[in-house]
Amino acid sequence: MPSTPIPIRAVIIDDEEGSRHTLKNLLSEYCPNVAVLGMADGPATGWKVINEYQPELVFLDIRMPAADEGFQLLESIDNINFAVIFATSFDEYAIRAIKFSALDYLLKPINILELQRAVNRYQKRRGENDQQGIRNLSNTPSTETEKEFQKIGLPSLDGVSFIDLANILRCEADGNCTIFHLTTGKKLLVTKTLKYYDGLLSDSNFYRIHGSHLINLSHIVKYRKEGTVEMSDGNEVYVSARKKKGFLEKLQQVNFRI
């Protein structure tokens, strides 16, 4: 007879009582392989339940209620030996979540299929790690996780579109908005400034080569000495004189030969 799978030990940390119980009920009904051992309403109590139950999977809100408190909790833990699934109402933290090797990033109200996919992803990783122990997530992000999770949430009137970073060619300023040019030829207009996205993406292989352009370095085809770059879609983008030196240094840092 096949052995009974060992339940995934989990805790939920969220300052909203309703959200905690909703997620617990969803897990109980749709992810029966997850055993919720404890719940907490903030960083202080979250730290306690993590130490008490030693979970292998933590469902974590980000604003509790102040911004970034979920990240602050993780930063206070020296040895993170559990996987993290963020569950939040805010899309703008998706890129920062990558730096904590987040397994997934779920937006409230939580979609059941997305929740199941996130749990199944952990179940698969858990099986792969049986022979090597649980990966230390505190300092060295998993290459596999980064590939799975390199997305950004772009808000629009009808919801949030999650786009793979690899599919973004460049971002163009349009007043206080930003136009995202995608590899599919599609353009997305987002009501946030280019400066905002520069701050989010500068550590993810993007570089602002002009006041109005932030480009994905992975899509550069050619740098022309007159001060333009040709992108993989055939478009050329001007490199400002002020940005040229820093841009060329950045290319060398990412192993482009100049």
Image (spheres, rainbow, N blue to C red):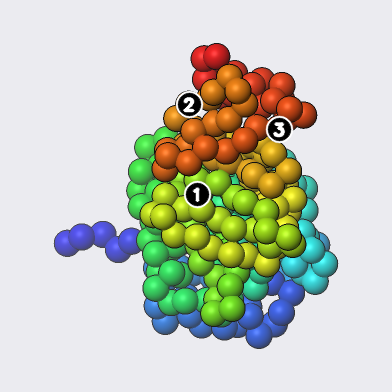
Residue at 77% in and 59% down: 68
Foreground disc of the pair 2, 1? 2
Give whichever of discs 2 and 3 has the lower sequence position. 2
Identify residue type, mark 1.
Ile
Q: Position of residue 47 (x, y in %)?
A: 74, 58
Q: Residues under labels 2 and 3: Cα distance?
A: 16 Å
Residue 216: mark: none
What element does badge 2 sit on? strand
| Foreground pick, 214 / 92 | 214
Q: Position of residue 87 (x, y in %)?
A: 60, 68
Q: Is residue 257 above or below residue 174?
A: above
| Foreground pick, 139 / 32 | 139
Residue at 43% in and 69% down: 114
Q: Is residue 182 above or below residue 28?
A: above
Identify residue type, mark 3.
Ser
Identify residue type, mark 2.
Lys
Residue for badge 2? 222
Residue at 58% in and 19% down: 225
Is residue 66 shown to the viewer in this render?
A: yes
Residue for badge 3? 240
Residue for badge 1? 168
| Foreground pick, 18 / 256 | 256
